[in-house]
Image (tube, rainbow, N blue to C red):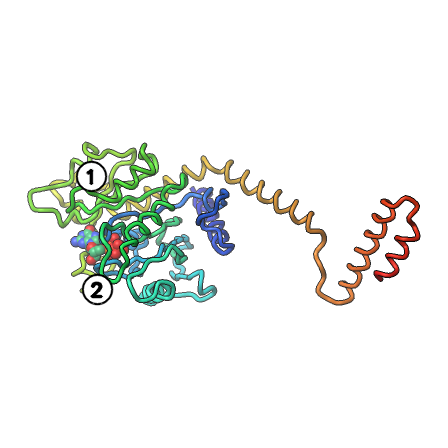
């Protein structure tokens, strides 16, 4: 288990290295290392509860929240499990070496960094924000929060935003190594769920889709979601997980994540409808389920990842060979390099000229 955890941690670090080098799977026509590594994308309609699910998994309050379109750039969130007792902190890729221990400042930075690229209007951008959280209380995971799928542009947005968001979401979830966390609110008809519709399109067999039903506490009295949670309607290969996040009123009252998790736990444990499913519900269970699934994916993909890395090393080495020796920085060594180049040019020139010693000699002297 420890080995597997460190392996997921290693994949996290490779992903981090990829992003530093500008490889986040973007629009590259070539297969990239990022694409070979597994990740989890959170997909759903606007206000379906995507950011709330992410926060519950992390157990921290750090994402900008509110009604309307809040997530306007993809957020690549890497969770790194640290030793027990160590302090939790966050780091942004665009602010290297700056450790954030106050998570309300993390939220502010996400907002400001979103605005820096999109402006303060409701525009969206496909340029991701990268955030790493180091904590003893998380499981090693890379999660990607995406803008909510919508059917209509809100005031201040161009009509094209609807298609732009769908294209952006699709570009992440169509990658075969991307697990899809399809978030659907339980108080809406599942048949109209954007998350279910889109994930079915890109993953028709449902092998990489995890259905998450939020807002179970907001269902009309006398109704429940047992048909879905027990897999009778909309079955997926992995069972649906029910979640109860904090309501907007809870957020306004600053109900903290620990209290929220406890309340979620109680909701399932004491519910006459869901009590028998309580051990397989809730955000903590979801985080463990995802981490476990990632483990098995990584295990099965190790040979592919290794061969991709080896292939890239080979290609880079042959490119380096082709480029020749590195050019030194100091003037003396540079002069030496030039002399060496002239010497080899002289030799090759000589070899190609029939009895041309004089010309090549003359040439080498004139070059020097
Ligand atoms: N009561 C209740 N409210 C919830 C639940 N999940 C989310 N909410 C509320 O629904 C609203 C939207 O939640 P978010 O998590 O911001 O939704 P989102 O999908 O990330 O929103 P966008 O990023 O704007 O698309 C917030 O006010 C949450 O408090 C839930 O399980 N129960």
Label 1 close to label 2 by CB (< 8 Å)? no
Q: Nearer the viewer, residue 341 or 12?
A: 341
Mark 1 close to ligand 1, CB under 8 Å: no
Residue 223 falls left or right of residue 346:
left
| Helix, strand or loop for disc 1 | helix
Which residue is at the front of the view, 19 or 26?
A: 26
Label 2: how many residues lie within 10 Å, few (<14), some (14-19) or many (20+)?
few
First in sequence: mark 1 or mark 2? 2
Secondary structure under the numbered disc 2 in the rendered image: loop
The answer to whether 343 is drawn above or below residue 292 in the figure is: below
Mark 1 sits on what residue?
Answer: 277
Q: Position of residue 250 (x, y in %)?
A: 18, 60
Q: Which residue is mark 2?
A: 254
93 and 259: which is toward the camera: 93
Q: CA distance from mark 1 to mark 2?
A: 29 Å
> Quick one: quadrant of the N terminus?
top left
> Residue 50: x, y in percent?
27, 51
Give the percent coordinates (x, y) of residue 254: 21, 64
How many tags in the picture? 2
Q: Would residue 159 be visible to someone looking at this image?
A: yes
Q: Quadrant of the C terminus?
A: bottom right
């Amino acid at each position: 288990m420890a080995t597997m955890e460190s392996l997921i941690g290693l994949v996290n670090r490779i992903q981090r290295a990829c992003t530093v080098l500008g490889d986040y799977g973007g629009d590259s026509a070539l297969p990239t290392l990022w694409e070979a590594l597994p990740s989890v994308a959170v997909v759903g309609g606007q206000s379906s509860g995507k950011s709330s699910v992410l926060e519950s998994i992390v157990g921290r309050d750090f994402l900008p929240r509110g009604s309307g379109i809040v997530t306007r750039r993809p957020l690549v969130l890497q969770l790194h499990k640290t030793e027990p007792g160590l302090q939790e902190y966050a780091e942004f890729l665009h602010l290297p070496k700056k450790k954030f221990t106050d998570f309300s400042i993390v939220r502010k930075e996400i907002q400001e960094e979103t605005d820096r690229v999109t402006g303060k209007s409701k525009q969206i951008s496909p340029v991701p924000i990268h955030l790493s959280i180091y904590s003893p209380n998380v499981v090693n995971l890379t999660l990607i929060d995406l803008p909510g799928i919508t059917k209509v542009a809100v005031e201040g947005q161009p009509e094209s935003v609807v298609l732009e968001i769908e294209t952006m979401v699709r570009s992440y979830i169509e990658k075969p190594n991307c697990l899809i966390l399809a978030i659907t609110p339980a108080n809406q008809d599942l048949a109209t769920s954007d998350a279910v519709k889109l994930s079915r399109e890109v993953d028709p067999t449902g092998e990489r889709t995890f259905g998450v039903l939020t807002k179970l506490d907001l269902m009309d009295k006398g109704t429940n979601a047992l048909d879905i949670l027990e897999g009778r309607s909309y079955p997926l290969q992995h069972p649906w997980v029910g979640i109860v996040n904090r309501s907007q009123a809870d957020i306004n009252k600053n109900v903290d994540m620990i209290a929220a998790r406890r309340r979620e736990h109680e909701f399932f444990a004491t519910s006459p409808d869901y009590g028998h499913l309580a051990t397989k519900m809730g955000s903590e269970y979801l985080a463990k389920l995802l981490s476990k699934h990632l483990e098995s994916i990584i295990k099965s993909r190790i040979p592919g990842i290794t061969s991709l890395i080896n292939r890239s090393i080979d290609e880079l080495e042959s490119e380096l060979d082709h480029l020749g020796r590195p050019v030194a920085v100091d003037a003396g060594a540079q002069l030496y390099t030039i002399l060496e180049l002239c010497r080899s040019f002289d030799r090759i020139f000589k070899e190609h000229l029939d009895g041309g010693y004089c010309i090549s000699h003359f040439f080498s002297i004139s070059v020097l």
